[in-house]
Image (tube, rainbow, N blue to C red):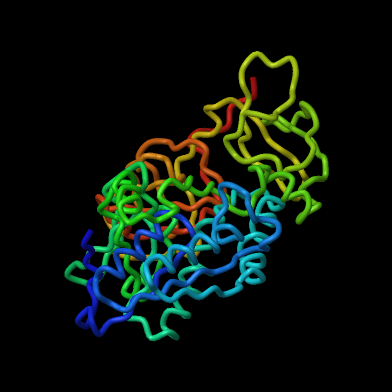
Amino acid sequence: MNADFQLPRPAERSRIVVAMSGGVDSSVVAALAQASGAETIGVTLQLYDHGAASGRAGSCCAGRDIADARAVAEKLGIAHYVFDHSTRFRETVIDRFAADYAAGRTPIPCVRCNEGVKFTDLLGLARELGADCLATGHYVRRIVGSDGPELHRAIDPARDQSYFLFATTRSQLDYLRFPLGDLPKSRVREIAAQLGLGVAGKPDSQDICFVPDGDHAALVRKLAPAAAVSGDIVDLEGRVLGRHGGIGGFTVGQRRGIAIGGTTAPLYVVRIEAAERRVVVGPREALAVAAAQLIDLNALGPTSGPLAVKVRSMARPTPARLAGDTVRFAVPEYGVAPGQAAVLYDGTRVVGGGWIVATQPALSEPAAA
């Protein structure tokens, strides 16, 4: 159960702060840190109201999860602190999530949470506590190369979370540690069970932890009423095909929820025109994208030459090149939407990424079926 935390000092004179969300992954990280011989401190951020989240399965950083993190810390004999960051989380993640839908974008709240509350606020807390590093339960690898630490995909492709960490800066990467990147999830649960941790069999948190029952549209309607205003569903030539109940219920590439009768071929959301409250639909071939323009590009390595890019967390990397602020796909990519992230890889290494603000169709748009 050894883990090399690559500490700048001998372990017995070092201090590790562990981000403990209450799940099995961060709990095992805390155990690995404690076993290293370094002083270990667990820190949990309360990210939303205890009452709203308490007892709800699939959440994280909420009522039951805080209690689980505290119980693990007591079991391991390490200090544990809880900091209330619910206001900042709401402003920077939840409210932005709703605003993105209202603007016709496809948000990725997990990236916003990592780049803000977790890897800015939590990292600052770790430094204030005098820690030599901040360790988390993310499934990625930190490999020290000739030019310093590099961010790489996890060994287990089914658990890899590198897509969500593309916005990690070089200075943050220098301070962060990810001891689970070389382990499969099954081994992590085995370690938790061997140590008698109560979270060994705890289910994984859902993708959007703050959305009750997965009904994101209801949350968007509540926080951004403009996203629930009805409008037209039109084809690629602007002909009205039907009506919708609000753009907050649609994303680019979506097929379900397009209630239009009389069509002989399936229709997909090709784009969302938020200002006009229009949802533009067309055949699947209209989703093909040749290039995507990025903003807030974060460079973690060389980005010249042939690379691979992912525009969704579970997608396979596809060949591409970066030209200025534009990613050009070697073959057309489907379902690329403003608001998504494009993450660039050189082999297993994350070399950069940015937020998609515009796309270039692969072909001139065909007429809708």
Between 137 and 321, the residue placed more toward the observer is 137
The image position of residue 355, as x and y in percent, is 50, 57
Residue 308, horizontal then vertical, whole percent: 32, 47
Quarter location, residue 83: bottom right
Residue farthest to the left?
146
Q: Is residue 86 left or right of residue 71?
A: right
**Where 10 sits versus 116, above or below?**
below
- Residue drawn at x 70%, y 28% is 258
Position of the C terminus, as image quadrant, is top right
Front residue of 68/101: it is 68
Across and down, in percent, residue 236 comes to 66, 31
Residue 323 visible in the snapshot: no
Is 278 positioned to the left or the right of 168 in the image? right
**Quarter of the N terminus within the rendering:** bottom left
Please tell me which residue is depicted at 41% across the width and 52% down the height of the picture: 163
Quarter of the view holding residue 218: top right
Closer to the camera in the image, 72 or 355:
72
In the rendered image, the vertical position of residue 282 relative to residue 171, given as above or below: above
